[in-house]
Amino acid sequence: MIRFIIDFILAYIYLLSRPFIDLITLPFVFFKYGKKGFLYFDDIGYRGDIDSAGRNRTLWNTLFVRNGGFRFRKNTPKTISRILGINGWLNQLTIIGWFVYYALWVIDVQNWFKGGHCFQSMKGEDFYIPNGVELDGELYDKRK
């Protein structure tokens, strides 16, 4: 229990100090890299998304995924959008999951006519489809 409390406190010290550290880092980045400094922080959101998909998996599975759907897992390098896309394709999202799925579709203007943000995120994904899941009007059976 003590180890949990210490880890929790240290994690939140890091999370709370990160924005300040990033702001202090910014002038150094532009001084060293010039205009290329604009790319320095380009993957922070993506890495945070993957981190949240694994770290907050219990919350996301409860809110977004029906039983039998593709689950959020620890140490799986997948974004929240990718897992929402997989479950949308499998029709395994909860009402809240569908709401987030379509909210991301609306936000990502570039993918409005390409199937939406979550669909584009899951394209090319190789994943396990459980037996009994309906795909395109047919019941999936991996024994076929």
Image: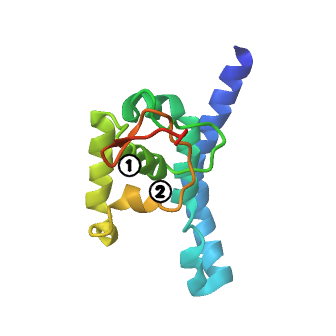
Q: Where is residue 92 in the image (x, y as percent from the top left)?
A: 37, 37
Q: Residue at x 64, y 29 (%)?
A: 9
Which residue is the site of mark 1? Answer: 89
Label 1: state its secondary structure.
Answer: helix
66 in relation to 21, above or below: above
Q: Which residue is drawn at 56% across and 43% down?
A: 128
Q: Which of marks 1 and 2 is in front?
A: 1
Q: Which of 75 and 37 is in front in this view?
A: 75
> Which residue reaches farthest top?
1
Which residue is the site of mark 2? Answer: 122
Q: Position of residue 117 (x, y in %)?
A: 37, 60
Q: Which amino acid does label 1 sit on?
A: Trp
Q: What residue type is labelled 2?
A: Met
Specify few, some or many for label 1: CA neighbours under 10 Å numbering under 14, 14-19, or 20 or more.
some
Q: Image quadrant for the N terminus?
A: top right
Residue 130, disc: none
Q: Nearer the viewer, residue 23 or 60?
A: 60
Q: Position of residue 84 (x, y in %)?
A: 41, 46
Q: Where is residue 46 in the image (x, y as percent from the top left)?
A: 53, 58
Q: In this view, does 46 lie to the left or right of 62?
A: right
Sequence-wise, which precedes: disc 1 or disc 2? 1
> Which residue reaches farthest right?
3
Q: Quadrant of residue 47?
A: bottom right
Q: Residue at x 60, y 63 (%)?
A: 24
Q: Residue at x 61, y 85 (%)?
A: 34
Check if mark 1's residue and mark 2's residue have beta carbons within 8 Å.
yes
Disc 1 to disc 2, C-alpha distance: 9 Å
